[in-house]
Image (cartoon, rainbow, N blue to C red):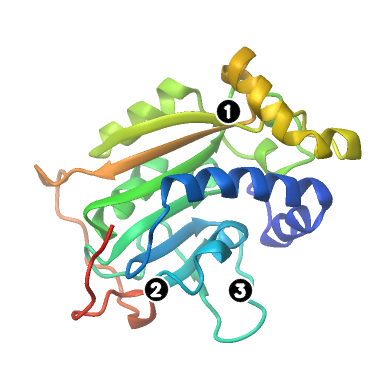
Amino acid sequence: MPIDVTDLKDFYDRPLGATVRRLLGHRIRARWRNVRGLSVLGLGYAPPYLGQFQGEALRIGGLMPAAHGVRRWPTEGPGRTTLVDEEALPLADSSVDRLLLVHALEAATSARQALREVWRVLAPEGRLIVVVPNRRGLWAQRDTTPFGHGEPYSRGQIERLLTGAMFAVEEITYALAMPPVELQLIRRSAPAWERLGARLWPAFSGVIMVEARKQVGAMLPGTLAKARFRPAFARPSSARRSD
C-alpha cells in the first residue's frame, strides 16, 4: 500500500527526514545548477527538494499522485501542488524542462506508463532525476521511512526501465549510505557516512539516483491521449530556454 502524503510530510518534519532532505537536495542541486527561466516540476512527493529552486525557476510545482493524496505547498502564497493521475498528467506536450521523480515510481500502478507520460510532457532534450529505493540497501528493508514502502529497484532494473521509455541515462549514483536511524550521532556524521559509503559500499546505499535525458529520435509506440491542460504549469510561449 502506498505511503500517505501525511506520513511523507511527517517524515520530512523529523530530524532524520531533514537530514535526508539536505543530503539528497545537495545531490539534486549539483546536477541542476542553473534552472533560471526553466519549468521545474516534481512528481510524487517533491516539495522537500523543490524549495531550493523557488525564485529561480520560471515555473515550479508539485504533482502528487492520487495514491499518496495531496497537501498544499508552500504554506504561504499561491499553492503550487495538485492531485494527478500519473498516467494522465494535466500538462501540455513538451511543457516541462526539468522533472524530479521522488517517492513516485516505487508507488506507481505502472511505472512504465508513468514514464511514458513523463516523456510526453518533457521538452525536447528535457531532463529528469529519478530517486528510487535501492533493492540491496538497508533503507528498503525497513518501513520506518518512506523508502521502505513500495517497489525497490536494482541499478539494472531502473536503467532498463528508463531506456525502455526512451530516455538516455546520463548518470547513475547512490545516496544515503548512513543507516536509517534517528540517532543524533549518526545524523550529525551523515556527510562522513556518504563519503565513506561512496568508497566502500556504494551498491548498498539507501537510494539510487538517476539523471536521464529525453530522446526525441523516435515516437513512442501508439498515440498517447492528450492530457488536460492547466496553464499554471505550462511553459509560456514567450519563455526563453537557458542552461
The span from disc 3 to disc 2 (Cα, nearest Å) is 14 Å
Residue with the mark numbered 3? 73
Residue with the mark numbered 2? 59
Q: In the image, is 155 to the left or to the right of 35?
A: right
Find numbered disc 2 in the image and state the secondary structure of the residue it sits on: strand
Residue at (23, 66) in percent of width and height: 241
Whether residue 65 is visible, yes or no, is no
Hey, what amino acid is under mark 2? Arg
Residue at (11, 47) in percent of width and height: 219
Given contact means CB atoms under 8 Å apart, are the residues at marks 3 and 2 in contact?
no
Residue with the mark numbered 1? 134
Q: Quadrant of the C terminus?
A: bottom left
The span from disc 2 to disc 1 (Cα, nearest Å) is 30 Å
Q: Position of residue 35 (x, y in %)?
A: 38, 62
Q: Residues within 10 Å of mark 3 (few under 14, many from 20)?
A: some
Task: Name the mark nearer the viewer: 2 or 1.
Answer: 2
**Closer to us: 6 or 113:** 6
Find numbered disc 3 in the image and state the secondary structure of the residue it sits on: loop
Q: Position of residue 19 (x, y in %)?
A: 74, 46
Residue at (57, 57) in percent of width and height: 49
Given contact means CB atoms under 8 Å apart, are the residues at marks 2 and 1 in contact?
no
Q: In the image, is 71 to the left or to the right of 113?
A: right
**Closer to us: 224 or 14:** 14
Q: Residues within 10 Å of mark 1 (few under 14, many from 20)?
A: many
The mark nearer the N terminus, 3 or 1, is 3
